[in-house]
Image (spheres, rainbow, N blue to C red):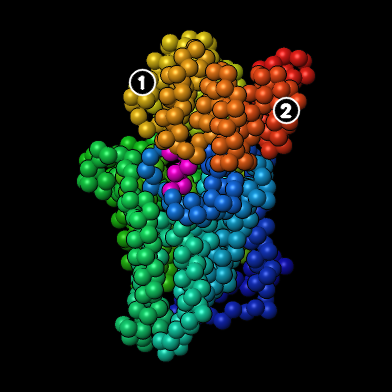
Amino acid sequence: MLRGYLDYLRESPKRLYRRPVACDASAVPNWLLISVLAFCAALPYLNTLGNEFVYDDSVQVLENPYIQNLRYIPKIFTTSAWSFTGQGPSNYYRPMMSFGYLLCYEVFGRSALGFHLVNVLLHVAVVAFVFLLTIQLLQSRSLAFWAAALFALHPVHTESVAWIGAVTDLELTVFYLLTFFFFLRTARPAGGIDRRMQIAMLISFGLAAISKEQALTLPLLATIYEHFFRPDRTQTTWSQKLARYDLLWIAAAAYMVLRIRLLGAFAPFSQFSGITKTQIVLSAIALLGHYFWKLLIPAHLCAFYVFHKSVGLWDWRVLAGLAALLVFTALFMALWNRARTMAFGLVWLVLTLIPVLNAKWVGANVFAERYLYLPSVGFSWLVAWAGLQLWGSTEKHLPILRKAFVAGLGLVAVLCSARIITRNADWHDNLTLYERTLAASPDAHLIRIDLGAIYDRMGDAGDAEREWKEVLQSHPDDAVVLSDLGMLYARQKLYSLGADYLQRAIKADPHYPDAHIKLGFVYLDSGELDEAATEFHTSIKMAPMNISGYAGLAYFSWKKGKILDAEEQLNMAEAINPSDPRVYFARAQVFAGTGREHEARQEYEKALRLDPENAEARAGLQELDSGRHP
């Protein structure tokens, strides 16, 4: 079968790109090709199904009340992705991500396996859509198959598939590809428009826009294609062309108005406020070169690349980026003259990358592998086309060349699959992810903070303190590490030292609610009850959805002997999020502390039903069984 399929791929490059070629559906059915592609897309990622929630997943899923209760659906669509934390403005408007999490939580609960399964299935769907879109766009099933196969097995996609938090790139790409597919199908002979396809295009575009901001490149991409690449461009008038894509521009404008209204600005938060416009441009050139290189050589993969802004034209990274742009320009001009349709692949690649090149708009990890997920569609077209050109050029030569070509393809597929599988293992758990990331990027202080938190959770206070103290050497005013150190010292009963660090954290970031909550608990343990209540009330004003603030007030009331007040605070917490096991754990401790052991047992059991891995609730039950109250 393989030999017959390879014979089917012997399409003349000249005939393929001078005019459309009819697909021979009888040779290899689409369903069979898509089945092979689905297998290639899913198999290397099956080991992600045993991975845990890592990095931001614990906050965005396990501690997010918006995705654990259907009544918060309006909040999902009208606030930023991090609004539930109360930590100030955010540039991340991700309703599709949060709504998808909500659906997954309804089905799978707190099981990471279900969330990972959805990521793998979305990747399979993207690969299938790459295949179908390529057929529609380039009129070649062989090119569509090989482009989709390359996309399925490109190791740079591991972050997008293996990390639950990167589902935004999967969702964006699904709807982006669908939108462009429907856009292509809107065209009818003689400049007409298929209204059904146009409606489908608008719906899909809306879903892409609420998935991620890169969707806003779609109207421009469609405009460029309509005027410079559409096969009937010379037979249609400007008004006919405009009618095919004008609704995309209108929908994009409506999205921007809505976004500004909801967030206060298109991008209300600047990660690097001190960076100048010149430095933004220079850094963008350097980033572009880095992205091109990562597509070509995806061997060294890392979850966090430390960003260093480019300040001069002679920066080697800027020079490398300029060299990449020269190569890009030369390749574009060559393709424009020889195979114009393939030049569109370069347009796709660069245009979808542009939104993530502005260092002021993206997160602390300015360069991220997941940002290449959508742009790599264009890259896949180009590489598949080049491969077919090479295959065609060997037709009149010795058969050994074709055998070597096939062997080379097989070797590349095996190497890519192996790299995906090994890279997926890096995302298995937080400890593995953070240690391997720091091995590749030692200056990633945010990852070092998280690694310290893992050590602290494991009971290794010495290693936790070492990691956090190292961060303070380069970032002495980091509110997160200061507050973490404060709690570490407080657990060692060094209350004064702990409070000092937490006060420094609040001074560094007055709008960081977790620092107030932690300081409140330090005050509780040191007997300063009124000061503790003040901190808890402050945190609730900042982050009214944060359960920990209400739990803190409940412990305060309990220590004051006001049991009814404590229960009222916990009832308020339960009303906010009845799916949060922390509510029932806190209530169990209050009941156990007042001698209501039967009720305490019921609350611990509720916490364990919601989270069977809750070690604190299990320990509470053991204390009740042993006769020791917490």
Give the structural element (helix, strand or loop) at label 1.
helix
Residue type, numbered disc 1: Arg
* Residue 149 visible within the image: no
* Residue 111 visible within the image: yes
| Percent coordinates x, y for residue 546 in the rendering | 50, 36
| Residue at the far right in the pictured view | 625
| Percent coordinates x, y for residue 486 in the rendering | 45, 18
| Residue at the far bottom in the pictured view | 190
Quadrant in which the N terminus appears = bottom right
Quadrant in which the C terminus appears = top right
Which residue is disc 2 drawn over? 599
| Percent coordinates x, y for residue 539 in the rendering | 44, 31
| Image height of 497 relative to 384, above or below | above
| Image height of 553 relative to 423, above or below | above
**First to last magenta residue range:** 80-86
The 10 Å Cα crowd at callout 1, few under 14, some 14 to 19, many 20 or more, is: many
Residue type, numbered disc 2: Glu
Q: Nearer the viewer, residue 390 or 492?
A: 492
| Image height of 513 relative to 81, above or below | above
Give the structural element (helix, strand or loop) at label 2.
helix
The structure residue drawn at horizontal position 44% and vertical position 44%, both measured from the top left corner, is 83
Q: Is 354 on the left-hand or right-hand side of 20?
A: left
Contact flag, marks 1 and 2 (Cβ < 8 Å): no
Residue 279 magenta: no
